[in-house]
């Protein structure tokens, strides 16, 4: 199993995504896997964590970030492993529900995020969000899932 990294040029034509990319490496059984995320707003502000579903990436929330920051919130948007700017595995069978939960919990712990409001979709990734909640419940304030189409995105 190889870990595949994107090139910056892979995203050169993306519009409305002006945010500074950040990467948090996590150790996996396949090696070091970089999880991409953006972190906008003050570290001292209330934090909103926007999780995407399948088959999207953090770009889904591009029209959410600036208004939330303008209203005094810190906004963090990760790309799940295998999506967006995060590293990918060379083989699909390397991804499991348990691994996603483990990887994202490691990522959350590495960033030392607490009292976070989690917002995410009600799609196939909802099971990840539920698994994510159990070990992180003490870190979360509110959890909101949506099952709606996001217009004009």
Image (tube, rainbow, N blue to C red):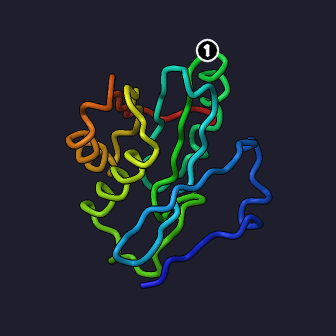
Crowding near the residue tagged with mark 1, few <14, some 14–19, many ≥20 C-alpha atoms within 10 Å: few
Residue 11 vertical position relative to residue 151 in the rendered view, above or below: below
In the picture provided, is 134 more to the left or to the right than 41? left
Residue 152: x and y in percent read 64, 34
Residue 15: x and y in percent read 77, 47
Is 109 in front, or is 131? 109
Which residue is pictured at 60% across the width and 59% down the height?
A: 85
Is 61 in front, or is 22? 22
Which quarter of the picture shows residue 138? top left
Q: Which residue is mark 1?
A: 71
Secondary-structure class at tag 1: loop
Which residue is pictured at 28% across the width and 66% down the height?
A: 96
* Quadrant of the snapshot with the N terminus: bottom left
In the picture provided, is 90 more to the left or to the right than 96? right
* Quadrant of the snapshot with the C terminus: top right
Is 26 in front, or is 100? 26
In the picture provided, is 103 more to the left or to the right than 20? left
Residue 63: x and y in percent read 65, 32
């Amino acid at each position: 199993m190889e870990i595949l990294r994107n090139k910056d040029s892979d995203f050169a034509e993306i519009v409305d995504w002006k945010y500074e990319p950040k990467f948090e490496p996590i150790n996996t059984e396949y090696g070091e896997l970089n999880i991409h995320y953006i972190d906008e707003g003050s570290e001292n502000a209330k934090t909103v964590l926007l999780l995407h579903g399948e088959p999207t990436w953090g770009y889904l929330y591009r029209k959410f970030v600036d208004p939330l920051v303008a209203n005094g919130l810190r906004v963090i948007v990760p790309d799940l492993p295998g999506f967006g700017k995060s590293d990918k595995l060379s083989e699909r069978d390397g991804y499991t529900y348990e691994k996603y939960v483990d990887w994202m919990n490691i990522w959350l712990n590495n960033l030392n995020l607490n009292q976070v409001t989690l917002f995410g979709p009600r799609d196939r990734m909802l099971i990840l969000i539920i698994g994510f909640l159990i070990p992180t419940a003490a870190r979360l304030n509110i959890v909101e899932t949506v099952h709606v189409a996001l217009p004009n995105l």
